[in-house]
Image (tube, coloured by chain):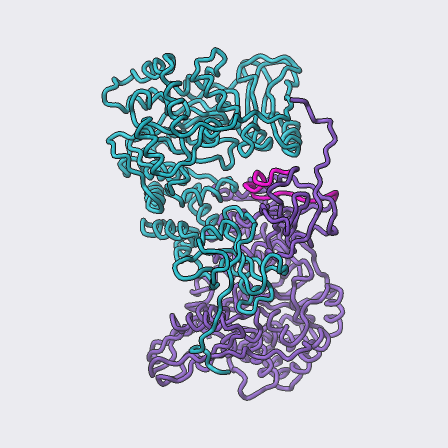
Chain colours: A purple, B cyan
Amino acid sequence: MPDESHKKVNDTLRLRRVAIDTYRENVAYLHRECEIYRAEGFQALSKVEIGADDHRILAVLNVVDDVGIVTPAELGLSEQAFTQLGLEDNSLVRIAQAEPPASMDAVRRKVAGERLDQSDYNAIGRDIADSRYSKTEMAAFLVASGETGLDRDEALYLTRSMVLSGERLDWNEPLVADKHCIGGIPGNRTSMLVVPIVAAHGMLIPKTSSRAITSPAGTADTMEVLAKVEHSPDALRQIVHRARGCIAWGGTARLAPVDDMLISVQRPLGVDSMGQMVASILAKKIAAGSTHLLLDIPVGPTAKVRSMRQALQLRKLFEFVGDELGLHLEVIITDGRQPIGRGIGPVLEARDVMQVLENDPNAPADLRQNALRLAGRVLEFDPDVRGGRGFAIARDILDSGRALAKMNDIIERQGRQGRQIEVGPRSFEVLAPETGTVTGIDNLQLARIARMAGAPMDMGAGVDLFKKLGDPVTGGERLYRVHAAFRADYKFAKRLTERSSGYTIGTRDQIPKPYVD
Amino acid sequence: MPDESHKKVNDTLRLRRVAIDTYRENVAYLHRECEIYRAEGFQALSKVEIGADDHRILAVLNVVDDVGIVTPAELGLSEQAFTQLGLEDNSLVRIAQAEPPASMDAVRRKVAGERLDQSDYNAIGRDIADSRYSKTEMAAFLVASGETGLDRDEALYLTRSMVLSGERLDWNEPLVADKHCIGGIPGNRTSMLVVPIVAAHGMLIPKTSSRAITSPAGTADTMEVLAKVEHSPDALRQIVHRARGCIAWGGTARLAPVDDMLISVQRPLGVDSMGQMVASILAKKIAAGSTHLLLDIPVGPTAKVRSMRQALQLRKLFEFVGDELGLHLEVIITDGRQPIGRGIGPVLEARDVMQVLENDPNAPADLRQNALRLAGRVLEFDPDVRGGRGFAIARDILDSGRALAKMNDIIERQGRQGRQIEVGPRSFEVLAPETGTVTGIDNLQLARIARMAGAPMDMGAGVDLFKKLGDPVTGGERLYRVHAAFRADYKFAKRLTERSSGYTIGTRDQIPKPYVD
């Protein structure tokens, strides 16, 4: 048994790009017969570290028995992992057992019920940003800090650590307005109306949004029907400098990237908590350079927030964290009993937005009204706008066509979408089972149907509503139409509507009262 | 936009086995250009359902751009997924969006702090057994029910649901003895001594064990150095019928499979809880048909249980759940301040065990003493053995060579290991940095070093201890030797010992007192 510690050993493998897209999870492929590394031993570990010199990534290891994928002298990396490592094909790389992230100790203390401090949250944020957390480790953190687990100071610490994890935009203006909805209401595309109205007034409103994760459309997905939404931070600065606003995807700017990583685990799990929601939203806004934020909290029986009590609790938490971080924040609680507008899905929602901007008599009145109320409140961030006058100014800007002109200005500067995107060609209608009044439209079920139909990946897929709360219907009358592009999606969506249409038909007195007016 | 609901569509793909071993996670491979299913849309989902007729599995979807892996007309499955689906290559299969498991609602209630009832735990157990849970969903359940989250009734419910999830062995005898240690102490291979002693006495002791997950050796891994450990339940019954005992891997019998699935997520996360530990151990024992169980809880500064207070709490929880489930259960608290015996790793631990059985004067005295105490207590389950006489009977059986003879009987019946497995050929020694007394040996660090060296995958890898607590050492004297087979493992283990040897050298008065005698 000779001591080999001084023997020079060549333990490198040749890097190979494997054409497998593993979606937000780095995967490395090692041949079972690899003579340098014991493939099966590594596999039981949660992660390995791969790289050379300064280029290092963490990945999950899969063992391969097909030299067509990797040979025993090669190390394969999935598309994402290869890109993230940033080395050429055939580079020489090494594998090491990845240490579990040091900050998992803090997560374990959190699981045990302890309160963590700012330095714990910063360490967790750094390790997540460096991709040191596996999905299960992120899930452990999310659950431990979920529901009952984050007090308001911890929500603040988490927000700060998320801001620190990425870049921060600076617009060099004293008032940078922003508007955000906590989500959960299909069709609620008010941002695409608020931005042109507010920018037409002259205020700076650089709106960056995410793409949908579990919903059928995000603002970025819907804007993409009309214009390019992926711009570098520099390009975005140019656009905003000239148009006073933008409606773009926030993903290019590396704003609070830890938030994106956590959300990709949290949304499919469906474990939500106030502390995480507040940290997620405010970290993104602060990183985006916003100084003034209007927050829309819709309340309704199938909304994210289901009682006024809960809405007020959430408002106070937003206010506390916002104040501590120097953000001018106002909260508006809105009616979230049903989807807003008619369309659900990018193309259908973009149609609704354009109808409102064009003052089309068929434009959905609820979308217009909501957008005007929100725009009015944002306008009142302007010191020169008298309290209470915002709504009228917003209405003027919309009715006069200046909002439409501004929207076209923004679209041109972002780059008009080259191709005309149509609604999904395969469609079916869902009919009222009986005569009566629409007494309920389940936000969650309608969103699910639109997703099953293919939204947001297929921009033309989704749901087009013909009836809203309080509308009278006769048995056999159309409630809504579902659009899909792929036949499998068409079938999935149809099956889902057959299980539950999402509509309830009853008598007028059964319509739930709005929590707000 | 024609209604297509009545049109017959052919939405099947040809099944292809992909030679990638994805370790406990089903992965499906779909070509990006697949014309039937929108590959990218499916990917954002946590799982898809794949199959035909009664053969259905759930899998994570990866998108492929290489027709060498799958063509647009094929659906690829990783090794595990292919085996689990149980269909032939080229079978026609369909994909569907997998619904999130219905019992995740209960998990979300648990996250929110609610107490769950027996039917909730049964539903969770069923969904996990059916592979409906993703790893992140299992992590969410584990964390929500961890540390502070399971009261004793819930520990009982979880145990019951785990028992229900699999098979249950029946040995057709009134007294089926078993012995289990909660783990955490390297080298603690007393089961391999207790079983032959107890079986030699004539009591039935069919010991089924797991393989190591995060430890350097499990009882099944160590027994495999000497004999075959994978037997069908029927073969096991034959062996036990004739030998009165066995030392086998429990994995072939589908005993409480939910426990294995949860453990595979829980161990790497390092979130442990009393409730989960009790449920995991007792579910396996009840499923294995045990009627009488002796439980070993080692206590020490680097053991799983670190204070007598905690040990007593754990004992009471074991007793409560055991009583409710009709198991005759006794708990013994032992000294867990340091590893037991000398070897850590399958081959080295098997050597220690055989030395004790052979009454070798070099046999590790602590391993012998521990095994005799435990065997004595198990023997006292026999109504014909007078209280307090078990130890002497056990010692008689060991000293007379009857235990060795019984071990050889069990090895022959299970099938003697054909090849002689040697210790790892690459080795290095770790030396005492100064003169003094060994005042601490860190169980966790020694286990980590043995794992880094390759144990348990390389059976010959591990650590061989030369010094134990209280031993005097002079600077430069050997503390232990590390054995490895692969050069990468050798280097990893060496680096780890350089960071910390796991030994502390001091003065005699610094040796921690044992919590028990």
Q: Quadrant of residue B145?
A: top left
- The relative height of residue A479 versus residue A277 in the rendered view (above or below) is below
What's drawn in magenta, residue-wise? Answer: A37-54
Q: Residue at x 57, y 25 (%)?
A: B423
Q: Position of residue A308 (x, y in %)?
A: 44, 65
- The relative height of residue A497 versus residue A36 in the rendered view (above or below) is below
Q: Residue at x 41, y 83 (%)?
A: A471
Q: Residue at x 44, y 28 (%)?
A: B227
As rendered, which of A442 and B204 lies closer to the eye?
A: B204
As rendered, which of A234 and B453 lies closer to the eye?
A: B453
Question: Can see residue A61?
Answer: yes
Q: Quadrant of residue A500?
A: bottom left
Assess whether residue A42 is covered by the magenta stretch: yes
Q: Position of residue A398 (x, y in %)?
A: 62, 83
Q: Residue furthest bottom?
A: A361
Q: Quadrant of residue B390?
A: top left
Q: How many numbered marks does the figure carry?
A: 0
Q: Residue furthest top?
A: B361
Q: Relative to A228, is B260 on the left or the right?
A: left
Assess whether residue A110 is covered by the magenta stretch: no
Question: Can see residue A319?
Answer: no
- The relative height of residue B400 versus residue B59 in the rendered view (above or below) is above
Q: Relative to A420, is A364 on the left or the right?
A: left
Q: Quadrant of the N terminus of chain A?
A: top right
Q: Position of residue B405 (x, y in %)?
A: 38, 18
Q: Position of residue A489 (x, y in %)?
A: 49, 70
As rendered, which of A499 and B105 lies closer to the eye?
A: A499
